[in-house]
Amino acid sequence: MANPLHDALFAPHLGSERSFLAAAGGAGGTSYGEFLDTASRLAHVLADLGLTPGDRLVAQLEKSPMALALYAASVMTGVVYLPLNTAYTAAEMHYFLDDSGARLLVCDSGRAAALSPIAAGLGAKVLTMDANGAGGLRDLAAGKPGGFSPVDRGPNDLAALLYTSGTTGRSKGAMLSHANLLSNAEVLAAEWRFTGADVLLHALPIFHTHGLFVATNIALLTGATMIFLPRFDTDAVIAALPAATSMMGVPTFYTRLLDDPRFSHDLVAHMRLFTSGSAPLAAETHEQFQARTGHRILERYGMTETNMNTSNPYDGPRKAGTVGKPLPGVELKITDPETGATLPEGEIGVIEVRGPNVFQGYWKMPEKTAEEVRADGFFITGDLARTDEDGYVVIVGRAKDLIISGGYNIYPKEVELVLDELPGVLESAVIGVPHPDFGEAVVGILVPRKGAVLDEATILTEAGIRLARFKLPKRVVVVEALPRNTMGKVQKNLLRQSYAKSFA
Ligand code: MCA
Ligand code: AMP
């Protein structure tokens, strides 16, 4: 019997009293044994509910040890774990529950009233779990035994389904197998020298690859401890840093810390590693960080579909403005977007990657998979880059119309579709512009119908019924017409130039 993720991440720690999820001071919290005991009880609940391997479990949960244990329980039972941003509206949740064919939704009790009718209409059961772990699921788990025999799984069986937005406005479920997740965790743990002596400061959300797989799977694999903060809060992070050895963050974490005078050389002199990813880290932030702390942030590059692809070295130069070299086992090439031909060093093209980290395709969208994964297995990332003279990858832009704000991806098309439907709106264009805190911020440019008067507050309130708050424009501009080229295509580059200083 085998279950690759269970065997590598959980089995070595069963019954262990070592600290897994520590409180802010680095002590107390949940031991590995307690965590796996909870996960086993949850696994019994899932199995007794009739969930079978391959069934999808949707989790829209506040970050908590119990929510993380539900991921572990899903792995144990072979159930495919589908975590979703707590910011998603009921309309967005409807799409994910429907598209994934979820059998079970686990959500906060505060959201159950809104989501239960949707889930019921789609044939999914609902159980509750609050931020403190309490709820219907914990009540059921309390009566279950502490050990669970993991369900047999092969390396290519799915462990998780993570949705990424798409250029058409329709989110796609990226199918991630046991081998995809495990191979990446093994490579990263070795490359970044994680061991059981590490205390990883975890302030990321656990519904994305970064916080759920990169951080958590590395900790589980190596027996490290995590200081598990509910969210990024500058005060809490500064209070927790003295007990940590390492931290993973998005660039906004680092710019916020640098804005705080308490974030000093002495505060982090003992730290071993800071990593950054999910969005471009400005070279300026990298340099400021070194000047303040003496540490060079290790920047890496990944995607939901591929896990991590490249990393700056642990030993050796960490170059600002680059995402380093392909990780061991990952093949990377830069290709001509038109012809697919591999380009010579220094030329800008699209990044393509192949390796054990690359996903199994998009859920129920074979045509999308075929568009983005070549017959020879190379995945076309849509990120534009070149390699430098040392083989480091320098990301210079995106071939896809995508905004990355505070590490969250927003596809303009999805927002435009909602804005276009609002009363009085003739058409819209959504762009990303530089923002001092989020890196990029969403700006909505609207053209009113003849005679209509558009009011920013009303637009945002109405769009907010359908869209998660982080996708809503931080600024709305009303114009008479959108700039178009001779083909009639909206010239977003001109709009980005016009509104570049909106948040300067
Ligand atoms: C919150 N808001 C945002 C964002 N976060 N708006 C735009 N972009 C965001 N990222 C909204 C809130 O709803 C609120 O709106 C207002 O902005 C201010 O919120 P604030 O309290 O400042 O936000 P926060 O709670 O401090 O969150 C900011 C954050 C957070 C800490 C940067 O967004 C975060 O943890 N980001 C990490 C994302 C991440 O893990 N990405 C990895 C995915 P209002 O005032 O209207 O209510 S990518 C990935 O996994 C790939 C594979 C990879 O390479 O890693
Ligand atoms: P997601 O779809 O949420 O997994 O986001 C993946 C995208 O985030 C990639 O395609 C890149 O555009 C971007 N990304 C991730 N890490 C970096 C990085 N270090 N520098 C620049 N962009 C990054």
Image: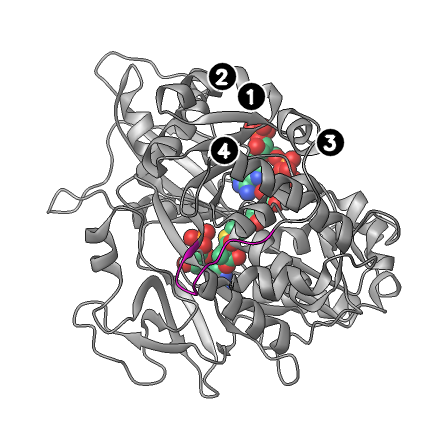
Query: What amino acid type is highlighted by mark number 4?
Result: Lys
Report the disc number at residue 111.
Answer: 1
Query: What amino acid type is highlighted by mark number 1?
Result: Arg
Rendered view: 15 above or below 482: below
Q: CA distance from mark 4 to mark 2?
A: 26 Å
Query: What amino acid type is highlighted by mark number 3?
Result: Asn
Q: Position of residue 124 (x, y in %)?
A: 42, 27
Q: Say whether disc 4 or disc 2 marks the residue closer to the N-terminus.
A: 2
Q: Say whether disc 2 or disc 3 marks the residue closer to the N-terminus.
A: 2
CB at disc 4 and ligand 1 closer than 8 Å: yes
Mark toward the viewer: 4 or 1? 1
Secondary structure of the residue carrying numbered label 3: loop
Q: Judge the density around disc 1: few (<14), some (14-19), many (≥20) Cα neighbours within 10 Å.
A: some
Q: Which residue is mark 4?
A: 474
Q: Nearer the viewer, residue 399 or 432?
A: 399
Q: Position of residue 367 (x, y in %)?
A: 19, 52
